[in-house]
Amino acid sequence: MRRFSIAVVAAVTLGTAFSSVPAQAHPGRPSPGLAHCAADVCHFDVPPGTYDVRVVVGGASASATSISGETRRALLPETAAPAGKHVTRGFTVNVRTPEGEPTGPEGTPGLDLRIGGSAPALADIRVTPARHTRQIFLVGDSTVCDQSGDPYSGWGQQLPQYLREGVSVANYADSGESTVSYLGNPRLWATVRPLIRPGDLVLVQLAHNDKTTDEATYRANLETLVAGVRARGGQPVLVTPIVRRWFNPDGTLNNGTALLVNGLGVDHPAVTRSVAAARDVPLIDLTAKTKALVESLGVEGSKALYLYNEARDNTHTSVRGATAYAGLVRDELVTRHLVPKGRVRVG
């Protein structure tokens, strides 16, 4: 695949088979850089950093285009354009090494953007270094992280599609991590903490793997993370864990397995709520939000949110479930005035 610098503008229109067809974002003036996109992927040879991406979608026929990038991150939801019309959209993307989970493989250098959708048509794409960006760092486990393989997806992997240009997601969630291991691994908290800038948000959801962590240690670890964020001038946000899909006979999730109470009797959501209140930290009660959604869908309907059908897995989410849960996080970010409404996509 060809590589090109961020100073160059790339353009491509994609048919149903993703064959390159010349397009014009502006009548009479062909978009430059078409040769730098191959099939359904555009590659930008840029160093790690944060970049604004401006795209123009649409073509001669009615189209519907989505964009993902790096390790299967959803960056632009499917966007419709009427026949003969163009629609301009922007988003901001975090490029890092490793590009997915912090303890995983390095991935490919640079920025890879993949063009998808039910009728994709990309007329123009421009990538420039971001100058005024607010980062949302994610500290979490496998239910949050950028999962490398289908059908798995963490809610943090789907969150970027809900954000407009000017806000990016730096997902440092990692599979299998507890509050203990996240603080102890130099590739995790010791790497994330120095990157936090004043005004950045740091969302912390760790509980699923704290199966043998006693309450005092769990509470102290959350307080350590909160203090570390604040010491860097960032804004900590505590997030209670997503529920496990574990129903009672009466159709509720009112049990320790579903609501993340560990074998020592530690009620992780309750402790998280308590720390948030005691330390005056914004709280996203994702346990309550996901519990309500899963119970509303019922035993059968909720299977699609998790990997029950694929792996009898009632903990990890499908793309559908991760997208729904990311939407809940988006709503809470706006409701709690953590991200301006104008920086968020709705619907």
Image (cartoon, grey):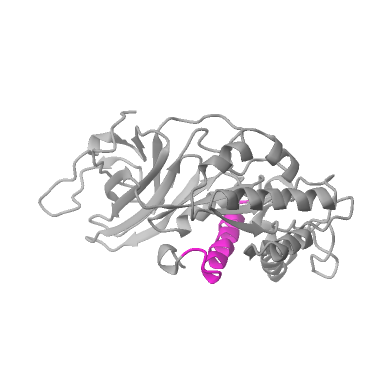
List the single residue furthest toward the left: 28
- Residue 333 colored in magenta in the image: yes
Q: Is residue 140 visible?
A: yes
Q: Is residue 101 left or right of residue 50?
A: right
Which quadrant: the N terminus? top left
The part of the image, by quadrant, that contains residue 83 is bottom left
164 vs 342: above or below? above
- Residue 20 colored in magenta in the image: no
Q: Main secondary structure of the magenta part?
A: helix
Rendered residue at 45%/30% (across/down): 108
List the single residue furthest toward the right: 264
**How many numbered discs, if any?**
0
User: Magenta part of the protein: which range?
Assistant: 317-339
Q: Position of residue 116 (x, y in %)?
A: 41, 48
Q: Position of residue 165 (x, y in %)?
A: 37, 56
78 vs 191: above or below? below
Rendered residue at 21%/47% (across/down): 23
Q: Is residue 163 left or right of residue 182?
A: left
Q: Position of residue 278 (x, y in %)?
A: 72, 64
Rendered residue at 47%/37% (across/down): 96
Q: Is residue 148 visible?
A: no
Rendered residue at 30%/40% (across/down): 19
In front here: 168 or 346? 168
88 vs 113: above or below? below
Q: Position of residue 43 (x, y in %)?
A: 35, 35
The part of the image, by quadrant, that contains residue 209 is top right
In front here: 227 or 267? 227
